[in-house]
Image (cartoon, grey):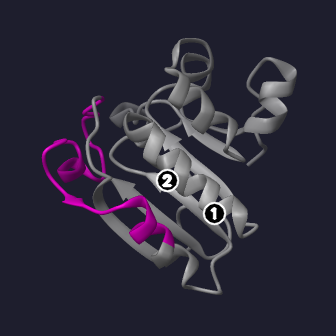
Amino acid sequence: MKIFGLAQDSIVDGPGFRFACFVQGCPHGCPGCHNPDSHDPSGGREMTVEEVAAEMLGNPLTDGLTLSGGEPFAQAADCLRLAEAARSRGLNVWSYSGWTFEHLRDEGTPEQKALLQALDVLIDGPFLLAERTLALPWRGSRNQRVIDVPASLAAGEAVVLPD
């Protein structure tokens, strides 16, 4: 797994104390991205999913896992295994993606679709500098949505959580 960085006890990547896993590599390259050094897929450091999971599960205060980046869905198989490790300990799982819910659901690879199904919440859509805001919780631009994934999969359309 290519890792850009790991953060214990994050309070800005979702509710509660979160283990934030920032993966390395992003095909979107959004201008103004807050992690531009995470875009190059040859950067970062290699870690096994087991090493990342051990760090995540070693903190009893952790409420959930947030997958960020980079683009988590570019490493969907490894991120799925990490999400499953989080779920095995009762943690909720959030992920950011520059792709939309609809794209991942309809056009994603089998691994991307499996990762989507393992999520509680997806913050979707590319970061748009012209839509940048600090006023909305959990996202950087107004076009991004905070989506209840299980409800969305059941409804067949994106169910956006209220602010």
Tell me if label 2 and label 1 are in contact, CB under 8 Å.
Answer: no
Whether residue 139 is visible to the viewer of this picture, yes or no, is no
Which is nearer the eye, 120 or 58? 58
Q: What percent of the width, then of the height, locates residue 7?
A: 42, 73
Q: Is residue 88 visible?
A: yes
The residue depicted at 13 percent of the width and 45 percent of the height is: 42
Packing grade of label 1 (10 A; few <14, some 14-19, many >=20) is many
Tag shown at residue 15: none
Q: Residue at x 29, y 58 (%)?
A: 3
114 or 92: nearer the viewer:
114
Magenta-tinted stretch? 28-53
Of the image marks 2 and 1, the number of the one nearer the N terminus: 2
Q: Please report the residue visible at 72 percent of the width from the left and 47 percent of the height from the top.
A: 120
Q: Nearer the viewer, residue 160 or 105?
A: 105
Left or right: where 119 falls relative to 90? left
Marks 2/1: CA distance? Answer: 11 Å
From this view, report whether residue 153 is shown above or below residue 38: above
In this view, 74 is above or below 6: above
* Vertical order, 95 against 4 (above or below): above
Q: Secondary structure at mark 1?
A: helix
For label 1, the residue is: 86
- Left or right: where 77 falls relative to 88: left
Where's residue 23, x and y in %?
34, 52
Helix, strand, or loop for circle 2? strand
Please tell me whether mark 2 or mark 1 is closer to you in this view. 1
| Placement of 24 over or under 113, stated as above or below | below
Q: Which residue is mark 2?
A: 67
